[in-house]
Image: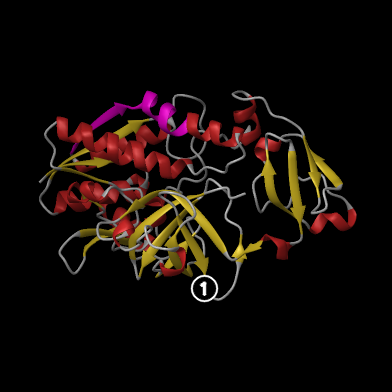
Amino acid sequence: MKLLVAMSGGVDSSVAAARLQAEGHDVTGVTMKLWGGESDTGCCSVADVDDARRAAQHLGIDHLVFNFGDDFLAHVVDPYVDAHATGLTPNPCIECNRHLKFDRLLGRAEALGFDGVATGHHARIVHDGDGRRRVARGADAAKDQSYVLYVIEPSWLDRIWFPVGDLTKAQVRAEAARLGLRTATKPDSQDVCFITASAGRRAFLGQRIPLHPARVVDGAGRPVGHVDAVELVTVGQRRGLGLAGEEAGRYALDVDVAAGVVRVGPADELATPSVVLGDLVWATGWGPGRLDATSAASERPAIDLVAQCSAHGQPRAVSVAPGPGPDTVELTWSGGSQGRVAPGQSVVLYHDDLVVGGGIARRVS
């Protein structure tokens, strides 16, 4: 196979390229230049491009650099800013995977005559009972990245490889050390690549949208505090709400940017029995075919699955049924309520270790 390996400059993608090369594939490394602004975290710095190039040289493979900056701005950065402006809590890493690391890169790979694309994600591609390729959890539960990969379209899976998905992180580093790769001890990338640790989210958003003060009120609508920038508040937040004294043990329950109001309450008021998802992506054989939204609500079938609400969140059993609107589903938490999912965040659905779908939490009035 002639494969294009996305090399971020980290240890996982370096070992991914080495493993495919050892299997006899014709491997070329590629680093996507995504963010042209200031960066001191994540995988977009100049140093990361240099690390990827050195790893490719060490392995004796060609290395390319693709400039996808315009696509990154349009599909990741701008939506991230717009989401905050409307009180949503986005996940830019998921959108980067959806639009850049797979859709855009697969298109470029095909145009250049490659058979497929490989990445260093800690996830696996397995075959289900019908022989279809499916995304599954990685071997290392602590590093599993299947959550951010639910957006992979089923039609893409025949052209995608995850060479390190069956290894633990310790095994990846040991293999890199054995190969003499400089990335063997490189720390994992953290946080959002286009938000610098020094300036932070406030400075980044403040340069792009106006930030507005807001009143903080309790359940009865009584003022209990204030925030300088309502666009920075997320559901479930406790710190930075301007609360004092006995009010300090309260959490953000709702964020209304348009009205300039944040409603707070005690931890038990964060609990909710269900969450509604839109913008759904389903694995082949799941979704509308198993959820008959045309039947009466009392007759609608439900599917028992496991849901995960963040990259390293605790999986929870859920019952999945058609939602209150078109192209939505409603998840009901099994065994009682759980904390609210911030509108804008992704919830990923699993059957055993297989990713079967996911969507984005809706704001429900």
The percent position of residue 77, horizontal first and vertical second, equals 48, 31
Picture colour scheme: secondary structure
Residue 63 at least partly seen:
yes
Judge by depth and name the residue closer to the eye, 56 or 28.
28
Q: Residue 302 appears in which quarter of the rendering? A: bottom left
Q: In the rendered view, tell whether residue 233 sits above or below residue 283.
A: above
Determine the secondary structure under disc 1: loop
Q: Is residue 268 left or right of residue 322?
A: right
The percent position of residue 364, horizontal first and vertical second, equals 58, 50
Q: Is residue 318 left or right of residue 18?
A: right
Would you say residue 361 sits in the magenta stretch? no
The residue pinned by badge 1 equals 334
| Residue at 40% across, 39% down | 96
| Residue at 40% across, 61% down | 349
Q: Residue 233 appears in which quarter of the rendering? A: top right
- Residue type for callout 1: Ser
Q: In the rendered view, tell whether residue 241 sits above or below residue 51.
A: below
Residue 180 at least partly seen:
no
Judge by depth and name the residue closer to the eye, 312 or 59.
312
Give the residues drawn in magenta, as a range: 61-77
Would you say residue 70 sits in the magenta stretch? yes
Q: In the rendered view, tell whether residue 31 sits above or below residue 328.
A: above
The percent position of residue 220, horizontal first and vertical second, equals 83, 53
Image label count: 1
Q: Is residue 234 left or right of residue 223?
A: left
